[in-house]
Image (spheres, rainbow, N blue to C red):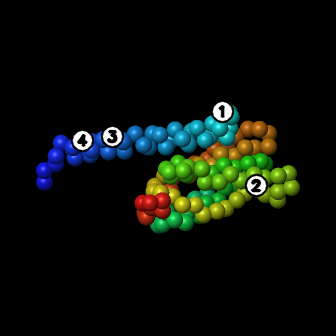
Amino acid sequence: MQFTRRETLAMGAGAALMTVLPFRANAAVDDLIAEFTGGAELAEAGVELTAPEIAENGNTVPVEVSAPGATAIMLLAAGNPTPPVATFNFGPLAASQSASTRIRLAGTQDVVAIAKLADGSFARQSKTVKVTIGGCGG
């Protein structure tokens, strides 16, 4: 099989683009986290994220998040075309600061939970979910 010069250049450009896209996706997640936290320091303890280690289908991946004393929890899927999944806000009369949902994942990626605690501090937890069948165009 022979390639023309134009096809070779197109494949090279495509390969270069594919190596740069993951870095931009991570930058978008970092920007969203900085916007939510205002650039504050993130603790590793204080929020609990439950997600399956392996998801057979990326269309419906069950995720649970809880953070006792939280006023808000932001959930992100780092590898999705649009990383923000949900933001849960809890008022003073909330029985518990926890939520569960099903999310759609494009492929194997990190799911990130950021909790804003009542004292103004922030906590972060992430978990890698391996997806065997992609849900967002995969």
- Alpha carbon distance from label 3 to label 2: 43 Å
In the rendered structure, which amino acid carries the disc numbered 2? Gln
Q: Compare residues 8 and 67 and report the one nearer the observer.
A: 8
- Alpha carbon distance from label 4 to label 1: 41 Å
Near mark 4 (Cα within 10 A), the count class, few <14, some 14-19 or many ≥20, is few
Q: Residue 98 location in percent, x, y?
A: 72, 57
Near mark 1 (Cα within 10 A), the count class, few <14, some 14-19 or many ≥20, is few
Q: Which residue is mark 3?
A: 16
Q: Which residue is mark 2?
A: 97
Mark 3 against mark 4, which lies toward the viewer?
Answer: 4
Please tell me which of labels 2 and 4 falls first in the chain. 4
Please tell me which of labels 2 and 1 falls first in the chain. 1
The reply, left or right, for residue 119 in relation to residue 104 is: right
- Alpha carbon distance from label 2 to label 1: 23 Å
What residue is drawn where x is 66% and y is 33%? 39
Near mark 2 (Cα within 10 A), the count class, few <14, some 14-19 or many ≥20, is many
